[in-house]
C-alpha cells in the first residue's frame, strides 16, 4: 500500500495518475494549503522541502519518496512498467521527464504566478514566461510529429508532461494550433486511469469559464506563494 500526500495541482496529478496507470493500491492524504499542512513537522519528515506530492511505501518499510520525478521513477521501477529497463530506452524516458521538470513545469508555474496570481500585472514577466512556455510546447509538438509518444512507448514522461500541458489555458499559453500536441493531449485525456488520477484528491471546477472559482483559486495560490 502507498500513502499519497497530495493536493489538486499538476504536480500532485503526476503522482496520482502514475499510481492509477500502474494499478497500485494507495491511500490519499489531502493536504490543506490554507492550514499549511505541507509545513507541519510530521510532513517535513516525509518531504523535507515542504511541497506536494510525496509518498510513503508501506510495503518497503515505510520508505518515503519526495519530488515528483523521483516518485514516478520509483513507482515505475517498482512495478517494471511505464519505463523500459534497457539503458537507452530508460534514458529516453528520463530525458523527457527532465524536460518537464526543468522546463515545462517551472515555466508554466511562473506564467501562472505573473498571469494569474501576482497582484501587479507585470507584462514583461508575463510575456517572458508565456513565450518560453510556448517555445517548449513547440519542442513537444515537433517530437510528437515524429512519434506517437514522447519516448516511443507510453511512459511516465507522457504523464508528467501531460499533467502540466493540459492546463495551458490557465497559464495563458496558446496551444490549439499545435496539432501534434493536441492529438497527444486528447489521446491521454481519454485514458480512464488519467481521468481518475486528475480527480485526486478532488476534481477541480472549470476555472477558465467560472470566474468565481478562478478568483477563489487564485486567492489561495497567493497565500501559498507567501509560505
Image (cartoon, grey):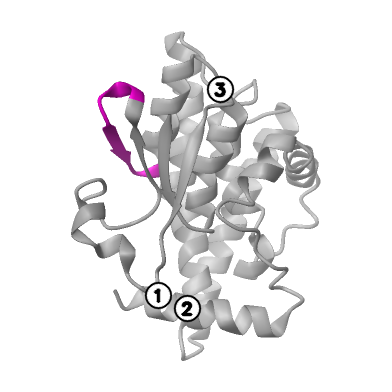
Question: How much space separates mark 2 and mark 1, taking CA atoms?
Answer: 7 Å
Residue for badge 1: 34
Front residue of 106 and 20: 20
Residue for point 27% across, 30% down? 63
SS at circle 3: loop
Residue for point 61% across, 30% down? 21
Identify the magenta region.
59-68
Q: Please identify the quadrant where the C terminus is shown.
A: bottom left
- Neighbours of disc 2 within 10 Å: few (<14), some (14-19), many (20+): some
**Given contact means CB atoms under 8 Å apart, are the residues at marks 1 and 3 in contact?**
no
Work out whether 26 lies above or below 31. Answer: above
Q: Nearer the viewer, mark 1 or mark 3?
A: 1
Work out whether 136 lies above or below 75. Answer: below
65 in magenta: yes
Work out whether 11 lies above or below 188. Answer: below
Q: Which mark is residue 88?
A: none
31 in magenta: no
Residue for badge 3: 82
Residue for badge 2: 220
Which of the two labelled residues, at mark 2 and mark 3, occupies the earlier sequence position? 3
Question: How much space separates mark 2 and mark 3, taking CA atoms?
Answer: 34 Å
Amino acid at each position: 500500500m502507498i500513502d499519497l500526500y497530495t493536493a489538486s495541482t499538476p504536480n500532485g496529478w503526476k503522482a496520482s495518475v502514475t499510481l492509477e496507470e500502474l494499478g497500485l493500491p494507495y491511500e490519499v492524504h489531502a493536504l490543506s494549503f490554507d492550514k499549511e499542512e505541507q509545513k507541519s513537522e510530521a510532513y517535513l519528515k516525509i518531504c523535507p522541502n515542504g511541497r506536494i506530492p510525496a509518498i510513503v511505501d508501506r510495503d518497503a518499510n515505510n520508505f518515503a519518496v519526495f519530488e515528483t520525478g523521483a516518485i514516478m521513477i520509483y513507482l515505475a521501477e517498482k512495478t517494471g512498467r511505464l519505463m523500459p529497463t534497457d539503458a537507452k530506452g530508460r534514458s529516453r524516458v528520463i530525458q523527457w521527464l527532465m524536460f518537464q521538470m526543468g522546463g515545462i513545469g517551472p515555466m508554466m508555474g511562473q506564467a501562472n504566478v505573473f498571469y494569474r496570481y501576482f497582484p501587479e500585472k507585470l507584462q514583461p514577466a508575463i510575456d517572458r514566461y508565456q513565450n518560453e512556455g510556448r517555445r517548449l510546447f513547440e519542442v513537444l509538438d515537433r517530437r510528437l510529429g515524429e512519434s506517437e509518444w514522447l519516448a516511443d512507448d507510453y511512459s511516465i514522461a507522457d504523464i508528467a508532461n501531460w499533467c502540466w500541458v493540459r492546463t495551458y489555458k490557465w497559464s495563458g499559453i496558446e496551444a490549439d494550433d499545435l496539432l501534434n500536441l493536441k492529438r497527444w493531449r486528447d489521446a491521454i485525456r481519454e485514458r480512464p486511469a488519467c481521468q481518475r488520477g486528475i480527480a485526486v484528491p478532488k476534481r477541480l471546477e472549470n476555472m477558465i469559464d467560472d470566474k468565481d472559482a478562478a478568483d477563489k483559486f487564485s486567492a489561495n495560490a497567493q497565500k501559498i506563494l507567501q509560505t
